[in-house]
Image: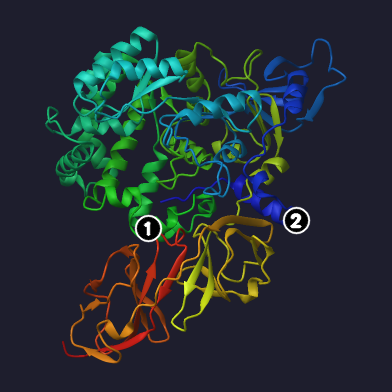
Amino acid sequence: MKTRFSSFAALALLGLILAGCSLSHSQLKGTPFDKSRDRALERQITVFKNVTLVPMTGEKVIKHQTVMVKGSRIAEIGPQLEGGIPENARIIEGAGAFLMPGLSDMHMHLRDDWLSPTWPVSPLNLYLANGVTTIRCLGPVGKSPDYALRWREDIKKGVLEGPAIYTCGKQLRGPVADPEKTVLEQKKRGFDFIKLYSFLSKEEFHEAMHTAGETGMYTTGHIPFQVGLDGVLAGGMDEIAHIEELLWEFVDFDRDKNLSWVDWMTYVTHAAYQHYKTYFNLDKDAFNRRFEPEISAVVKNLRAANIPICTTLALDDLIVQKLYTPDAFLERPENMYQPQGYLETFLQGKEKHQLQFRRVKRLAPVKHKADIKLLMELHRAGVPLLLGTDAGTGRMGMIPGVSIHDELQVLTENGFTPYEAIATGTINASKVVRKMTGRDDFGTIEPGKRADLILLDKNPLEDVANIKSHRGVMAAGRWYDAATLQKMIIPSVPIKGAIHNVHEPSNTHKTYIDIVIGRNFMGKLPDDIDTIVVTGPGGDLQISRDDFIFLPQFRDFWIRIPGSPKIGPYIFTVKSGNRKGSVTDTQFDILTIPIPDAGKSVPAEKAILRTTTPTFSWEAVKLSTPMCYQLEINKLRRGRVYSTGPVKGMLSHKVPHGVLTPGQSYVWRIRVTDNDNWIDVQNRSHSVWKSFTLSREE
């Protein structure tokens, strides 16, 4: 298993650290353009002088070329410009460099929190830094897809930095109450295409396709389980969203079932496992020989239909790595760009693919083999393929922008020349967008095309890895040199922070502050955290980083301050070298929660327990509002071994098997809170610690 990472991203990070640059959070997220800059772009002339052109109009390079860009468009190309270089032109010297079209990720997902502190770097910036100047969203993640339309227009106008966006609206997942109405609404609102999903019924699929055909809406998506590949081709769907969708054609299952989406996935996954389990131990060559006849028949039908298919195969690599070598996955340097909470979810075993393959783990490598064989046969047959990664959801470990280089590498490792691989994300991508919008707008370096360009140090037609090392990227006429891109992808320090008013057993009130560092912080804790500043309603608190206690099991900097906190917002700011993270928590109210009566809780102080699964119980505190209770068990002077998490109204709890060890001594207490989410807790109290010992004889 290879771990691939954009060397540009890593070098950019190192370079900026060495340069000693300091960035605000707003800069990291991509400061919006001002209007004067946008107006200036309309008049801006940029000239790339003496470059070696990689035009992607054929498998060739053209030396000693000059390319003039006016506004957002390529205006002129040649050994010399007809009227010479205009006096007001910005000149970018291209001696020894190669100029190629920007890349497209034709299958990714926008998420409505991309511009928030949830992401250490805006994925829009990551795309630009990795040479991706066009992205196509196959399902915006969030409560409403409207933000995708807004971002699309803001980027066009120069209000927001990022690649050009094409997007569908809400996916038609199934069941859909009124497919015709849904398609018409998306058409009216200005979405670029319709995304169809696996759980549509035959009737829903055909109604959506009929309406899309009448309105001229482009369609792509999964192969609905009830419809199958033959039905999709007969229905005229324009494109298939993943190569992996074709795997269901080799599995025998009842397509006429009427199931919920959860039951569909359980049913077909089990059917796939039963189908492929006979072949788990076959090597790659034997596997290919076994499935070649079936794959060839499917590919023949696809070639006859000339239907484009998105690749999304680097994700297969990643799935196998996550399931079989999780330590290698966790060590990937690009994890610094994971959204907050993802790596914690992975370590808990609750990540999307960990759950999806929990009972069918051995299916993942077989799926990988089948997908690669399909890729090779589709390529050999000349089926149009589109470069796509499925990045952006924040749920699968794929890093936006970075993953495009992984995808190109998969293609060249499996029979594609560098030119053919790059074509999937340039020429082929623009042809599909022409079907969607009517404009063949990018993908080649020709007059009139959108000025989406990458200036490289080395020839990409010799090795696609050369695309990682560039001097700069132009997106719709806006030029970003390497130094600017470096600044744009310095990750913020991922932190969560909380402030609580705590009533202690001594009948005093204290302010507790927790600042938790996310697992995608790749530095050494606690040493690589330089400063911590807490700003409250009255200004900076008189505490420093050295005043905090670091709790390594929670990656938590914790401090206790005398007195209750003031009402109002608290800003926690953490710095590590040239990286900074900031988060806000607000204390809305102050409430004294009574201390739990330790004398009325079981087991008693210094109890000797004779079962490894004891039940702990306690009385409710006397308040009119229902409280949440949390059982905490620590080893004596050695930290936490068990905690339930806050549960509303819980007054007893049985400890599961395997937590407690015979012969060991422990302490326990009850924490009472006004919320079941530690960040949202305003007030809490806790009982005194009580000790107990587990007998060696049960």
Q: Is residue 83 above or below residue 458?
A: above
- Of residue 154 and residue 361, the one placed in the foreground of this image is 154
Q: Is residue 40 above or below residue 349?
A: above
- Of residue 342 and residue 425, the one placed in the foreground of this image is 342
Q: Earlier in the sequence, mark 2 or mark 1?
A: 2
**Residue 96: horizontal and vertical position, in percent?**
74, 33
The residue that appears at 30% across and 90% down in the rendered structure is: 605
Q: Secondary structure at mark 1?
A: loop
- Three-letter code, disc 2: Gly
Give the number of the mark in front: 2 or 1: 2
The residue that appears at 61% across and 71% down in the rendered structure is: 527
Q: Left or right of 346: which side holds 565?
A: right
Please give the residue where the numbered disc 1 appears in the rendered image: 325
Check the image and name the residue furthest to the top.
Answer: 214
User: What kind of colouring is applied to the model shown?
Assistant: rainbow
**Residue 250: horizontal and vertical position, in percent?**
19, 32
**Residue 480: horizontal and vertical position, in percent?**
70, 35
The residue that appears at 23% across and 20% down in the rendered structure is: 204
Q: Is residue 519 above or below residue 182?
A: below
Q: Left or right of 217: which side holds 508?
A: right
Q: Secondary structure at mark 2?
A: loop
**Residue 246: horizontal and vertical position, in percent?**
27, 30
Please tell me how many numbered marks the rendered image carries: 2
Q: Is residue 124 above or below residue 597?
A: above
- Of residue 661 and residue 536, the one placed in the foreground of this image is 536
* Quadrant in which residue 604 is drawn: bottom left
Please give the residue where the numbered disc 2 appears in the rendered image: 20
- Three-letter code, disc 1: Thr
